[in-house]
Amino acid sequence: MSAVAESRPPGRVHYAWIIVAVTFLVLLVGAGVRATPGVMIVPWEHEFGWSAATVSVGIAVNIFLYGMIGPFAVAIIERFGLRLSVCGALLVLAVGTAATSLMTAPWQMVLLWGIVVGSGSGMVATVLGATVAGRWFGTRRGLVVGLLTASSATGQLVFLPILAHLATDQGWRTVSLVVAAVTLALVPLVALLLRDRPADLGLPRYGEDTVQPAPVLTENPAKRALRGLAMGLRSRDFWLLGGTFFICGASTNGLIGTHLIPACFDHGIPQVAAAGLLALMGICDLIGTTASGWLTDRFDARKLLAWYYGLRGLSLIFLPYSFDFSFYGLSLFAVFYGLDWIATVPPTVNLAGKAFGEENAALMFGWIAAAHQVGAASAAWLAGVARTETGTYLGAFVAAGLLCLVAALMALFVGRDRDAPALRPLPA
């Protein structure tokens, strides 16, 4: 089928940027939902007598499903479209978070925060940003992935200090209801503005001159996702990228995103001030991850990943000693670590596209991101167990730092076997 020439008037803002703005808001709210348990651990300990290890089970299930849903989310979006898929995910999140205000037992916490919210948040994860960038942008894709990934940090920036104040002044149940209301309010906006592909509006992708017809997809989403996994398991690059991203998850939202607030509380730093540290990380990561997308469009993604993981490892090893300098030492850590929080995403998406083809980049990144969340879930649970057994997070922080140094070395070997016979790409 021949491509259609573009008829968009010169100088008009491409609709792709409106899609980016809507997706940014969705990912921002999704990040706020995922970060909410970080301000719930201490209130749940006080009200129900649950230990950090007990709460960490629910958080670990949430993080695990958040990652494992990702590749299936890509296949669902390919089959049913962006608008319907995202609206459905937001409704699941709203119902799940609102229902948590009624829970009284640990199994209810695991069911609601773990399974329901974890499944809904997996649909509005970083794979959504990768899908939007691939569908709507022919150029500046790295910058767009960086910007949309940074929305996760911005979600912490916007929500965590507010939620910490609400949890302190109004109680944790108010936090659940506020998060549910904000999530529900996004549904009409998404239904009104989000579109599946540029071809739906008669437009080419940003940076291109011709309209590419949308492919007709009838394959079962689960079969499509599992076939992608089978292809990835035969690739050394997949194992390297999945391994580095496993460590990425273990050293970010699994450890710091979940346990920094209780770690600060252990050292006499109030919950609201600790949430402010995560917000400071959010500011820094908004800058760092957007800059990472810009750099990914221009430099070797492998070397960027090596630098990111190496610097993150050093900052995590420094973290236990920063408590000796009170809040100022932690502020230094927050700035340094925040610039590198999830800057790894744009170069990882770039390398996935080179390894498996542009048409498969979002799906394969979904599986790589699943490894990220397995690592995050493992760290969320193990760090909670470590705190319960030893009374400190020292071992968890240092171990995560050393793992990051290993990831820095692994990143340099991605793509070294690119001259080997290429894997057969997945048909659209």
Image (spheres, helix red, strand yellow):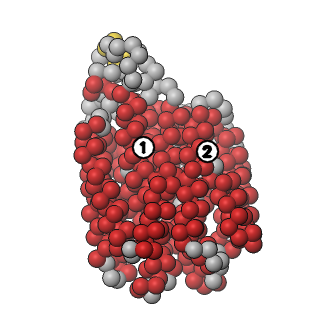
Q: Residue at x 46, y 84 (%)?
A: 46
Q: CA distance from mark 1 to mark 2?
A: 16 Å
Residue 61: image location, x then y, percent: 42, 68
Q: Residue at x 44, y 65 (%)?
A: 163
Quarter of the rendering occupied by the N terminus: top left
Q: Residue at x 39, y 23 (%)?
A: 13
Q: Quadrant of residue 265?
A: bottom right
Residue 114: image location, x then y, percent: 38, 68
Residue type at tag 1: Phe
The tag earlier along the polypeptide, 1 or 2, is 1
Q: Are marks 1 and 2 in contact (CB under 8 Å)?
A: no
One can see residue 305 in this view: yes
Badge 2 local density, few (<14 within 10 Å), some, or many (20+)?
many
- Indicate whether 5 appears above or below 66: above
Q: Kindly identify which residue carries mark 2.
A: 288
Q: Nearer the viewer, residue 37 or 81?
A: 37
Q: Residue at x 39, y 29 (%)?
A: 16
- Indicate whether 282 appears above or below 162: above
Quarter of the rendering occupied by the C terminus: top left
What element does badge 1 sit on?
helix
Q: Nearer the viewer, residue 340 or 5?
A: 340
Residue type at tag 2: Gly
Q: Kindly identify which residue carries mark 1.
A: 24
What element does badge 2 sit on?
helix
Residue 199: image location, x then y, percent: 30, 25
Q: Nearer the viewer, residue 71 or 104?
A: 104
One can see residue 65 in this view: no
Badge 1 local density, few (<14 within 10 Å), some, or many (20+)?
many
Q: Quadrant of residue 393?
A: bottom right
Is residue 297 rendered to the left or right of residue 11? right
Is residue 328 rendered to the left or right of residue 242? right
Residue 14: image location, x then y, percent: 38, 24
